[in-house]
């Protein structure tokens, strides 16, 4: 596949797939920030009808003033509700989509209400329409490309349907001309839709860039697996989730046996290929919500959502799987058996945080090495 094709595939995968736990955790913080910004903007929106009245010298429509004040009060009440939900310790996966739907739909309703003060206002009003762009732009803080396209698509659909309905309702060309808002132009409405599309693409690019930066800082460059920094950062949240959901978690610390011989006998490039070969086999035993982490040159951590006894059985099957798939260091060369030793630690009986779990697992890993390698130890001897 071409480089261009790889780039496009990576872009689409990043933007349209569910973000990993790190991105979702950062997105929860972004949702709280959005809620605070929404509350601040909603409070400032109370001034807009009054400023419009002052600028017009009192010549503005009383209906428009009432609509503006009523809408401002409504969005302030809702903004406080969303802020309260975002402030909760429990993370709601549906909240970003719910608040984005609210942001876009509220803008559409206010634009539609402007029709009762001036039939041209929904088409040519700038201040209210800009909140579509704000709604799209703020999705960048949630670090979820799906949300960005959801917001952009909803904004374009709602505004397009609203303008089409209002244009169809107009009985004559004179109804599309206003002293305050000028003349309605279909081309101008198309331009607004194009601006929404451009804002969506720009915001999606920002989300993609942010996701790539986070991935690169928490990923192993050789295998693409999460690294030690990811483990330290994510583990508190993982343990909290396990505790809240009443699940089991076993941390497995694995170390490849006598791995240096590959680098010495065949070179570091062969060693890199061997690491990727091993990582591919380890990935195959993972289930939903489980993780494989590379924390060192030949050390891996498996986070398994199962009791320690079941984890031992799964790792024993992994040992047999790796024995059936020897590594070939060079073309035409003899296959090499790569084995590992492992130590297991169960949460919370063997530790309540990542440091204590790693200490328990490392103690059992050293016991496995002393007993002859190529084995997994689940209990202290």
Image (cartoon, grey):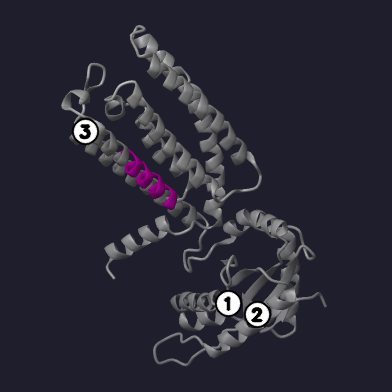
- Image coords of residue 303 (percent x, y): 64, 67
Is 341 in front, or is 13?
Answer: 13
- Can you tell which of label 3 and label 2 is closer to the viewer? 3
Q: Majority secondary structure of the magenta segment?
A: helix
Q: How crowded is mark 1: few (under 14 residues within 10 Å), some or many (20 or more)?
A: some
Q: Residue furthest left?
A: 173
- Can you tell which of label 1 and label 3 is closer to the viewer? 3
> Which residue appears at 51% of the width and 60% of the height?
219
Query: Of the residues under marks 3 and 2, which one precedes in the sequence?
Result: 3
Report the residue marked by disc 2: 314
- Image coords of residue 35 (percent x, y): 54, 36
Asked if labels 1 and 2 touch by Cβ distance under 8 angstroms, the answer is yes
Q: Is residue 204 above or below residue 172?
A: below
Q: Which residue lies furthest to the right in this view?
A: 381
Q: How crowded is mark 3: few (under 14 residues within 10 Å), some or many (20 or more)?
A: few
Query: Of the residues under marks 2 and 1, which one precedes in the sequence?
Result: 1
Numbered label tally: 3
> Which residue appears at 76% of the width and 58% of the height?
352
Report the residue marked by disc 1: 285
> Which residue appears at 67% of the width and 71% of the height?
252
- Distance from Cα at disc 3 to Cα at disc 2: 63 Å
Residue 154 lies in the magenta stretch: yes
Residue 161 lies in the magenta stretch: no
What stretch of residues is rendered in magenta?
146-159
Residue 188 - label:
3
């Amino acid at each position: 596949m071409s480089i261009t094709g790889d780039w496009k595939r990576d872009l689409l995968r990043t933007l349209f797939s569910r973000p990993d736990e790190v991105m979702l955790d950062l997105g929860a913080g972004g949702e709280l920030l959005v809620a605070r910004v929404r509350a601040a903007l909603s409070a400032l929106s109370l001034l807009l009808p009054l400023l419009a009245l002052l600028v017009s010298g009192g010549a503005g429509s009383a209906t428009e003033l009432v609509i503006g004040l009523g809408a401002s009060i409504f969005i302030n009440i809702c903004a406080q509700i969303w802020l309260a939900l975002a402030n909760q310790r429990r993370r709601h996966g549906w909240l970003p989509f719910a608040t984005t739907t609210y942001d876009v739909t509220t803008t559409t309703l206010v634009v539609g209400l402007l029709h009762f003060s001036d039939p041209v206002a929904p088409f040519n009003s700038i201040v209210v329409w800009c909140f579509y762009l704000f709604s799209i732009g703020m999705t960048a803080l949630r670090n979820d490309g799906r949300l960005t396209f959801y917001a952009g698509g909803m904004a374009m659909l709602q505004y397009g349907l609203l303008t089409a309905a209002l244009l169809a309702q107009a009985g004559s060309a004179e109804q599309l001309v206003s002293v305050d808002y000028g003349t309605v132009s279909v081309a101008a409405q198309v331009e607004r839709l194009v601006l929404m599309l451009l804002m969506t693409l720009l915001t999606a690019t920002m989300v993609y860039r942010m996701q790539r930066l986070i991935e690169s800082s928490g990923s192993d460059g050789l295998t693409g697996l999460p690294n030690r920094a990811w483990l330290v950062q994510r583990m508190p949240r993982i343990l909290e989730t396990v505790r809240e959901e009443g699940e089991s978690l076993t941390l497995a610390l694995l170390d490849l046996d006598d791995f240096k011989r590959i680098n010495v006998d065949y070179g570091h490039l062969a060693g890199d290929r061997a690491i990727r070969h091993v990582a591919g086999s380890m990935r195959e035993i993972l289930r939903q919500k489980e993780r494989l982490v590379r924390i060192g040159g030949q050390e891996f951590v498996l986070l398994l959502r199962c009791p320690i006894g079941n984890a031992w059985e799964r790792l024993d099957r992994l040992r047999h799987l790796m024995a059936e798939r020897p590594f070939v260091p060079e073309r035409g060369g003899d296959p090499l058996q790569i084995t590992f030793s492992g130590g297991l630690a169960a949460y919370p009986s063997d530790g309540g945080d990542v440091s204590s779990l790693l200490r328990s697992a490392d103690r059992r890993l050293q016991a496995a090495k002393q007993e002859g390698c190529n084995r997994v130890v689940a209990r202290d001897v």
